Amino acid sequence: MGISERKERERQEMRTKIIDAATAMFMTEGYEKTSIRNIAEKIEYSPATLYLYYKDKDELLYEVQKQAFSKLEEAFAREVNSTDPLERLSQICHSYVHFGKDNPKMYDLMFMMQAPMNTIKENEPWKNNKDSFVVLLDCLTECMEKDLLRFDDAMLAAFSVWAMGHGLVSLNVSCRLQTMNMTGANVDVLITTAIDQYLKQIKK
């Protein structure tokens, strides 16, 4: 291995170390306590060293967000496997919503928190969500090719389905379902039923 290859490997190892520490701190201590200085202290480096890799906290959290999307993609890989496109659409919706319910802090960083999005320049695409969104878009495209849904535009359908799922998760993550005096198992039933009823409405 040459010098340049070794240096690049060391840089990647350092990035991984920083991201892992940032993820652990974010998950246990929250956004406010996750700082460049605190992360540097945790991995026993100076803050100046971390600034060689990330210009600020927002850029670092964008990388943490990317790792969170990898977890969602892993959930899809495990739970979305039907060859029937309508059944696969149902699997996607349930997998997405339950992922958000089971990982509220991660979901907040992925879909609700502004900080990581500050890294994206104007008119620049949001790449972290691309692979998981393609899973939904491809499924909806197949459904529409087989004339199974009340949509004639796959992107519009994806926006509608995503908005439905996000609405359910965000209400739950932000504890807004408590206004309905619903907790625990009752919330699970409500969410499952809401998804199933929505999918019935958009089927032909």
Image (cartoon, rainbow, N blue to C red):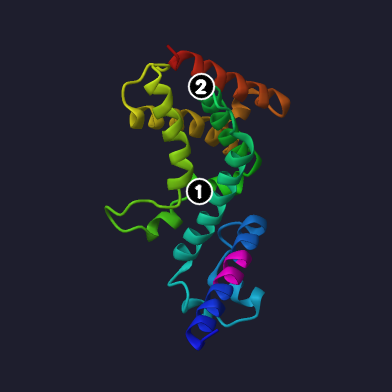
Q: Is residue 151 above or below residue 71?
A: above
Which dot, 2 or 1, sits closer to the camera? Answer: 2
Q: How many marks?
A: 2
Placement of the N terminus among the 4 image quadrants: bottom right
Q: Is residue 51 magenta?
A: no
Give residue 19's quadrant in the image.
bottom right
Secondary-structure class at tag 1 = helix
Q: Residue furthest left?
A: 123
Residue 35 at x, y = what percent?
55, 68
Please provide percent x and percent y for residue 141.
39, 29
Query: Which residue is painted at 54% across and 30% down in the image?
Result: 93
Task: Measure how far apart labels 2 and 1 are at the Cα level.
Answer: 26 Å
Front-most of 71 and 33?
71
The residue located at (54%, 73%) in the rendering is 12
Instruction: Specify whether residue 18 is painted magenta.
Output: yes
Give residue 98's quadrant in the image: top right
Report whether 34 appears left or right of 124.
right
Q: Amino acid at mark 1?
A: Met
Q: What residue did someone put label 1 on?
A: 110
Q: Which residues are magenta?
A: 15-21
Provide residue 85's location: percent of width, then percent of height.
50, 24
Look at the picture and state if 129 lies above or below 185.
Answer: below
Q: Is residue 59 visible?
A: yes
Left or right: residue 190 versus residue 134 is: right
- The answer to whether 83 appears left or right of 187 in the picture is left
Find disc 2 in the rendering and name its residue: 86
Residue shown at the point (66%, 26%) measured from the top left: 187
Mark yes or no: residue 160 visible.
Answer: no
